[in-house]
Amino acid sequence: QVQLVESGGGLVQAGGSLRLSCAASGRTDSRYAMGWFRQAPGKEREFVATISRSGGVTHYADSVKGRFTISKDNAKNTVYLQMNSLKPEDTAVYYCAAAMLLFTSTREEYDYWGQGTQVTVSS
């Protein structure tokens, strides 16, 4: 079992930045690919970014490419999402997730989920 706890959400003006953190506990021997997803009111949960088990490969949704950066610190069992140039359409609850795979951006392949952290971008 893996427990995931997100932090770092909040209210920011358009053009601003936030850094989300996801702390993992439990069986965290670096065997998981990690991902960030988001869900806006009335919409499906959508993929944002993923990082491979080793941290060497990343992949982003087109909507955030060039603005968001995913990274991980295996020693700290923590994954980060640096979000720059934020837009009002980035407003959503952001979820961290872990998959027992090398690498995946498919929501259904993630095994563990955090409780989410709210990000609100004002115009």
Image (cartoon, helix red, strand yellow):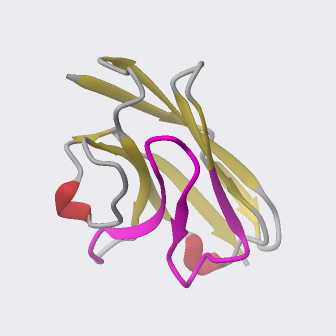
Q: Is residue 101 left or right of residue 54?
A: left
Residues shaded magenta: 43-70
Residue 66 point in image, percent of width and height:
72, 76
Judge whether residue 50 is colored magenta.
yes
Residue 14 point in image, percent of width and height:
77, 73
Residue at the spot x=27%, y=47% of the render? 101
Report the front residue among 122 and 7: 7
Report the front residue among 38 and 78: 78
Q: Is residue 117 left or right of residue 15?
A: left
Residue 89 point in image, percent of width and height:
57, 80
Residue 61 point in image, percent of width and height:
50, 77
Residue at the spot x=55%, y=61% of the render? 58
**Quadrant (top left/top right/bottom left/bottom right) for the N terminus:** top left
Q: Above or below — where is 1 with respect to 8? A: above
Residue at the spot x=82%, y=64% of the render? 16
Q: Above or below — where is 31 with respect to 59? A: above
Q: Is residue 37 left or right of residue 10?
A: left
Residue at the spot x=73%, y=78% of the render? 123
